[in-house]
Image (cartoon, grey):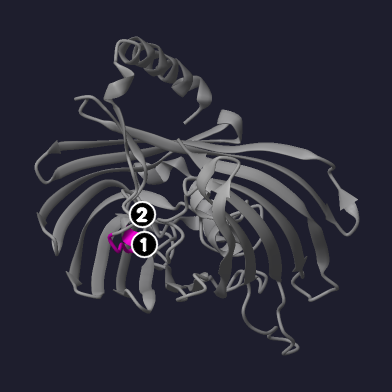
Amino acid sequence: MSLRDVSPIFVCILFFGHLSFGQIDSTLLKRRPVDTLQQTLNMDAPYNRPFLDVGKLPVSLGGYMEVNWQRLGTDGVSEGHQFQARRLTLFVASTISRRLKFLTEVEFEEGGREIAIEFASLDLEFHPLLNLRGGIILNPIGAFNQNHDGPKWEFTDRPISATQLLPATWSTPGFGLYGKYHSEAWMFGYEAYVTGGFDDSIIDNPENRTFLPASKENAERFEEGNTLFTGKIALRNNAIGEVGLSYMGGTYNTFEADGIVLDEKRRLNVFAIDFNTTLPRLNTFITGEWTFIDVDVPDTFTQQFGDKQHGGFMDIVQPILKKKIFGWEKAVVNLALRLEYVDWNVGSFDETGGNIAQDIWNIMPAISFRPTPQTVIRLNYRHSEERDLLGNPPAVTGGFIFGLSTYF
């Protein structure tokens, strides 16, 4: 979807919205806070956001924004100071009637150059353990894909495993079921969806390697394509934390056209495990995710296209100061650390038995300031080392990144 197509519509929405909101008494504006008392699962993330209710209007509004400055260099070569308006995201939610609710998330990236509908679903609630969802769905592979809002994280960048191994904010049209069960200190949840899937670009792309994020560039996946199944189960204990197991798989190649068989059906299978917990007394928050990918790569492709990949990340966030700061009653200063690793080609060369490298590891210490839970100002330092296929000395990247992100 191009900006040229969307901008006239967006301008009309803003114009008529201004006329409507200009006549609304500000006392009718009511912030609906995020529920921090009730235990939730990662699957609740799309709805567990701060929304603004306006009088008796049938919709609630919300969103978040991110802006950064960075100065990074690779092997001593830098592009200098970079100022980035990374994303502006808008939420619109509506309770259509009892047990019928709708939510959409529209994201504007890079100052509006890229516009995407990341989520747009209708939920029909039959029973806490049985609900139907249909629309554009955030596939629940791992935890980050659904729980990706910038203000929730102490780091300016999304995890490498979520953007360069999995396609971050991977959303596809489809249908499925979900449900939750809660009993005292325990909570169980599941999701199961059948949606549109991946395509040949995961092995035919400018990266010249097996690269699942390449399928995000194909807008046709919202109209036609392969079928993908995504399923997840999650278990949470109030004292221990949450663990999730998820699977995503299906045929990815074009095996038939106009009734003519072109190739055998080739599958990809993705498995992920995620975990998060808060240590007692210290209030140290730990979250992580690890992903395993298996792709049926044709024998005609060279070994630079890996049939197995894995990677993940772990974040450790430690509050070091909680007090009134500059008039903010519950301001918090955090120290944080992210450790991450991705291997795009797990295996050995057939000819020599030597290891195929093609991997990257990254360490990112951070300090953040939260004047409120919904706003974060953060300073990160990135140090990463990336090796090529042959395992030559790695390209070393380092530098500082400063940014802020807030719900509104």
Q: Residues within 10 Å of mark 2 (few under 14, many from 20)?
A: some
Tell me if I can see residue 107 in this picture: no
Image location of residue 77, percent across then percent down:
89, 52
Would you name the residue on which mark 1 appears? Answer: 42
Prevailing SS of the magenta stretch: loop
Membership of 30 in magenta stretch: no
Query: Which three-letter amino acid code belongs to the residue tagged 1?
Result: Asn
Decide if residue 242 is on the left or right side of residue 134: right
Q: Looking at the rendered structure, which numbered label has been put on residue 45?
A: 2
Q: Are marks 2 and 1 in contact (CB under 8 Å)?
A: yes
- Look at label 2 and name its amino acid: Ala
Residue 268: quadrant of the picture = bottom left
x, y (%) of residue 92?
32, 34
- 50 displayed left or right of 211: left
The residue that appears at 34% across and 32% down in the rendered structure is 61
Residue 173 location (% of width, % of height): 31, 47
